[in-house]
Amino acid sequence: MKIWLNGGLHDLDSARVSVLDHGLTVGDGVFETVKATAGRPFALTRHLDRLARSARGLGLPEPDQAEVRRACAAVLDANPMELGRLRITYTGGLSPLGSDRGDQGPTLVVALGETKRRPDSTAVITVPWTRNERGALTGLKTTSYAENVVALARATEQGATEALFANTVGQLCEGTGSNVFVVLDGEIHTPPVASGCLAGITRALAVEWTGAHETDLPLDVLDRADEVFLTSTLRDVQAVHRVDDRELPGAPGPVTAKAMRVFAERAADDLDP
Ligand code: PLP
C-alpha cells in the first residue's frame, strides 16, 4: 500500500509523522472520505471545497488544492482497486512543544482503503447525547471524532450500523457519519444544516436530485415516519429497516427506492457533480 505524505508517495509501513503532530496531540485536524470507483474519485471538487472550509474553521492554513488533487491521483494510480475509499487527512502539523502551531507546516496524508457496497437497508438507533448546533466546530469535518466512536459502539452493541443524534433543542440532526432523511405523506424531508449536521455531500446531491425539503424535525418524527433513509459517501442512499425497537418492514419503501435509483443513475453519469 502506497500513501501520500507531505509531498510524495511512501510505503505505508515506512511513512512517519511526528509524535508531536497537532493532529495527535490536540486533534485539530480535518479530513475527507472520498469514494473512488475503478480509480475515479466521486465529487472530488465538493470534498476539496469542504476540506478547505473545515480547515478555515479551525484556523489551519488553506490546503493546497492542486497538491491534494495530485496526491489523490497518485494514490489511486499506485493502488488499483474496484471500490476504494480515499482518506484525506490534514492537520496543523509538527510544532515543537510550547511554540505556535504550524512552525513546520501542515501535515497532509492521503491513504486508500478497499470498501464494499453497503446493503440496501440497515438498522439504526437513537442516542441520548446531543449535537451542538452552535459550537465552534459545528459543521466542520474535524478529526475529533471520539463522540461518534462512542455512539457508533453503542449502535454496534444493539445490532445497528448507525446512531442518530438530536441537537440541543430536541430536533433530529444526523448520524455519526451520515445524514438522515424521513418520508412523511410521500414527501422527503431532511434536517437543515442549521440543525448542526454536517453539510453532507451525498445529502446535498440527494436534496438536489430528489427535491427533498430541508425541514426542522423533532426527534420523535422517527416514530411516525413512513420511511427513513441515510446518506453518506460510503452508504450512498441507504434505507433504514429499524429505528430502535420500531421495525419499518419492507424497507426500502417506494420513495426511498426511487431516491436510491435516481442517486445511482445521476452519480454514475457525473463523477464530479
Ligand atoms: N455527518 C457526519 C458527522 C459525517 O461524518 C458524514 C460523513 O463522513 C456525513 C454526515 C455524510 O457526509 P458525506 O455525504 O459528505 O459523506
Image (cartoon, rainbow, N blue to C red):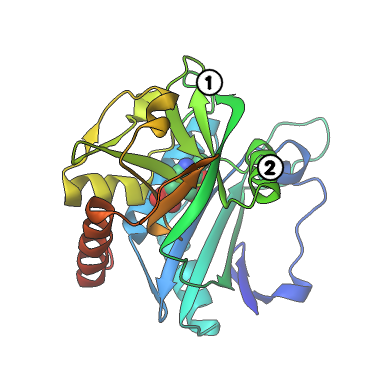
Q: Residue at x 22, y 51 (%)?
A: 255
Residue type at mark 1? Gly
Q: Residue at x 44, y 25 (%)?
A: 219
Residue at numbered disc 2: 154
Ligand 1 within 8 Å, label 1 CB: no
Q: Residue at x 62, y 72 (%)?
A: 3
Foreground residue among 105 and 168: 168
Vertical relation: 6 (above or below) 57: below
Where is residue 183? Give x, y as percent.
27, 40
Q: Which mark is residue 245?
A: none
Where is residue 53? Give x, y as percent.
42, 39
Foreground residue among 63 and 104: 63
How many neighbours does mark 1 have within 10 angstroms: few (below 14), some (14-19), or many (20 or more)?
A: few
Residue 48 visible in this rendered orientation of the protein? no
Check the picture and name the quadrant holding the N terminus. Answer: bottom right
Where is residue 152? Give x, y as percent.
64, 45
CA–CA distance between discs 1 and 2? Answer: 24 Å
Residue type at mark 2? Arg
Q: Secondary structure under badge 1? A: loop
Q: Earlier in the sequence, mark 1 or mark 2?
A: 1
Q: In this view, which residue lies farthest toward the top?
A: 169
Where is residue 256? Give x, y as percent.
28, 53
Whether the residues at callouts 1 and 2 have beta carbons within 8 Å, the answer is no
Vertical relation: 17 (above or below) 139: below
Residue 230 visible in this rendered orientation of the protein? yes
Q: Secondary structure under badge 2? A: helix
Residue at numbered disc 1: 135
Vertical relation: 45 (above or below) 162: below
Check the picture and name the quadrant holding the C terminus. Answer: bottom left
Q: Residue at x 55, y 32 (%)?
A: 58
Ligand 1 within 8 Å, label 2 CB: no
